[in-house]
Amino acid sequence: MGLWHGAGWNFIIFRLIHGIYVAFEIYIRKRHPSFADNPLFKTRLGRIISILFTQYLIFFTWIAFQVEDTELMIYSMQKFLIWDFQIDNTIGFIRAHKFESGLICLFLILHFISFRMGNLIKRISSNNLYFFSFLTIIMIPIFFFYDGNYEDFIYFKF
């Protein structure tokens, strides 16, 4: 994957972290097969915890994929792992990243709705009105929050 994306160190580190995740999962599944049958993971709370933990690990890995400067990447990863709860610039950051913040909010809302309704994808795809409404809900934040700056998109940096 590092060679495919230009062989930068950040992509090699991204792939290395991803490989560690996969190796750890294979190790746990082989060494402790009963772990998957843990009653906690069958409950609603257990599923929520596993989803949030998986998302946390994915976001951590994306730091290596996105940040180009190695020092800044290591600093960002440390801040991501060790929360210091310094939120002085949070409102300013959200205002500067309206599009991304809107997508995060939309993601959380759709996850909540999907979790409450169950099998949401089948319901949406079975009815044209639902499907059109779903696409509209997705597209409206893009129209309102996208600032037209395509240079931030990672694939335009190569």
Image: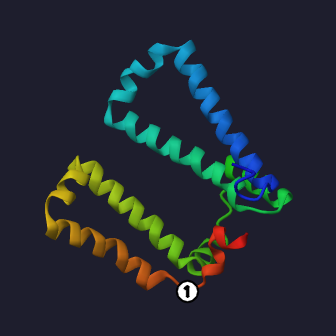
Q: Residue at x 36, y 76 (%)?
A: 139
Residue 67 lies in what quarter of the image? bottom right
Q: Nearer the viewer, residue 11 or 102?
A: 11
Task: Quadrant for the C terminus, please.
Answer: bottom right
Residue 120 image offset from top left, x and y in percent: 23, 53
Q: Nearer the viewer, residue 99 or 85?
A: 99
Q: Residue at x 84, y 57 (%)?
A: 70
Percent coordinates x, y for residue 111 in the rendering: 35, 55
Residue corresponding to mark 1: 148
Q: In this view of the protein, can residue 84 be seen by the observer?
A: no
Number of numbered labels in the structure image? 1
The residue shown at (81%, 60%) is: 72
Is residue 89 left or right of 44 when viewed as pictured?
right
Q: Measured along the vertical axis of the image, is residue 102 above or below residue 52?
A: below
Q: Amino acid at mark 1?
A: Gly
| Side of 12 where 96 appears, left or right | left
Q: How is the image coloured?
A: rainbow
Query: Which of 42 and 61 lies nearest the eye of the viewer?
Result: 61
As displayed, is residue 139 above or below residue 83? below
Q: Quadrant of residue 134?
A: bottom left
Q: Which element type, helix, strand or loop, lies under badge 1?
A: loop
How many residues crowd around disc 1 within 10 Å: few (fewer than 14), some, or many (20 or more)? few
Q: Residue 117, how many percent across, how many down?
A: 21, 51
Residue 49, quarter of the rendered image? top left
Res. 124 visible in picture: yes
Residue 47 percent location from the top left of the image: 38, 37
Q: Left or right of 153: which side holds 118?
A: left
Picture layout, residue 80 above or below residue 27: below
Q: Residue furthest right?
A: 71
Q: Residue furthest front?
A: 4
* For residue 45, above or below residue 10: above
